Image (tube, rainbow, N blue to C red):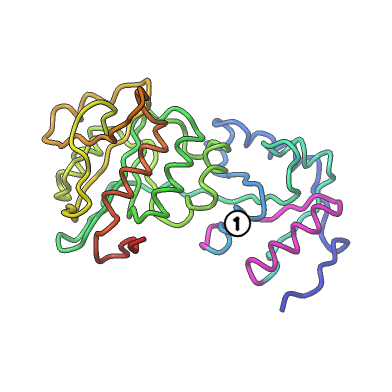
């Protein structure tokens, strides 16, 4: 049982620390400190449950902040070790959203390198490669869909939006913390890793290619998804690959990349057995 919450026992954040945390709203600030500020009960809870390196949790000094902490304690099963109080006006300045929920956390972000990662040849492997995805909401939604539909690993190429962009992180709804995600990988390195890992390359194409055959899935593959207006990195045109597309009707030319990606992943994994396969629906 979670003990009674007593906000008066939580230290108040100093102005000096608040000033430092404001810098986390920029890419430079996050890169220099290695810290990430996340908002919302669900996102903070997922970070704690998945064992992320959470340095502290912040609660707005009002009824909404207290209610949020109650929900967080119920979700996680215990209170965070370090809870700080923040005046509502200061919390709103830190937050990246309007009408901030009143709960946030500071975590130390540890980027995951692709170097040295090996996939046993006897093991099924499903990888999503996000190549030149420019919109943070689309990237975050793709990560969320990929985690939910059974992707084992995500590679984000250097031409894409930053993984730790607050909008990207928020759009993942916590899925970011539950599977390996490699950010800022050069496309040639990603292609070489796929080749060395024995993965079939599948490239999503809005206008041509095969329709995924869910009845005869390949067990080891990497699906390459690109931005809607930015072409794939040229390296994907130099290696053996199959192109896939979702057929559309009524004059619709293309789908949002996050929607198209979710549809393709679902078709590829729908009946694939073993290694955490997605259940049939």
Q: What residue would you read off at disc 1?
A: 54
Residue drawn at 42 percent across, 48 percent down: 145
Q: 192 or 116: which is nearer to us?
A: 192
Residue drawn at 86 percent across, 54 percent down: 63
Residue lying at the far front in this picture: please name it.
250
- What is the number of callouts on the image? 1
Is 250 on the left-hand or right-hand side of 237? right
> Residue 67, position in %: x, y?
79, 59
Q: Is residue 90 magenta?
A: no
> Residue 168, position in %: x, y?
52, 38
Is 81 on the left-hand or right-hand side of 254? right
Q: Quadrant of residue 263?
A: top left
Q: 149 or 188: which is nearer to us?
A: 149
> Residue 242, position in %: x, y?
15, 37
> Residue 90, position in %: x, y?
81, 39
Q: Quadrant of residue 47?
A: bottom right
Q: Secondary structure at mark 1?
A: strand
Is 181 on the left-hand or right-hand side of 73? left
Residue lying at the far left in this picture: please name it.
240
Relative to 134, residue 271 above or below: below
Q: Is residue 51 magenta?
A: yes
Q: 247 or 183: which is nearer to us?
A: 247
Residue drawn at 24 percent across, 55 percent down: 125
Q: How many C-alpha atoms fall within 10 Å of the one at disc 1: few (<14), some, or many (≥20)?
A: many
Relative to 22, residue 75 above or below: below
Q: Which image quarter is the N terminus in? A: bottom right
Q: Which image quarter is the C terminus in? A: bottom left
Residue drawn at 57 percent across, 41 percent down: 33
Instruction: Find the magenta span and give its range.
Output: 50-77
Residue lying at the far bottom in this picture: please name it.
1
């Amino acid at each position: 049982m979670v003990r009674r919450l007593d906000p008066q026992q939580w230290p108040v954040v100093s102005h000096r620390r608040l000033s430092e945390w404001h810098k986390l709203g920029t890419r430079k600030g996050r890169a220099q400190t290695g810290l990430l500020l996340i908002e919302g009960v669900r996102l903070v809870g997922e970070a704690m449950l998945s064992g992320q390196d959470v340095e502290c949790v912040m609660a707005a000094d009002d009824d909404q902040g207290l209610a949020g902490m109650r929900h967080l304690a119920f979700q996680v099963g215990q209170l965070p070790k370090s809870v700080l109080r923040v005046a509502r006006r200061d919390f709103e300045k830190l937050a990246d959203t309007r009408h901030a929920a009143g709960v946030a956390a500071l975590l130390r972000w540890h980027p995951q390198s692709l170097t040295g990662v090996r996939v046993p040849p006897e093991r099924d492997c499903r990888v999503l490669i996000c190549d030149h995805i420019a919109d943070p909401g689309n990237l975050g939604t793709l990560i969320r869909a990929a985690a939910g539909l059974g992707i084992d690993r995500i590679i984000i190429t250097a031409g894409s939006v930053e993984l730790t962009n607050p909008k990207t992180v928020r759009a993942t709804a916590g899925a970011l913390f539950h599977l390996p995600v490699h950010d800022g990988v050069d496309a040639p390195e990603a292609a070489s890793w796929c080749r060395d890992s024995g993965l079939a390359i599948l490239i999503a194409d809005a206008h041509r290619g095969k329709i995924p055959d869910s009845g005869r899935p390949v067990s080891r593959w990497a699906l390459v998804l690109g931005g809607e207006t930015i072409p794939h990195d040229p390296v994907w045109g130099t290696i053996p690959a199959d192109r896939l597309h979702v057929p559309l009707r009524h004059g619709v030319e293309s789908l949002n990349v996050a929607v198209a990606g979710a549809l393709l992943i679902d078709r590829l994994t729908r009946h694939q057995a073993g290694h955490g396969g997605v259940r049939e629906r």
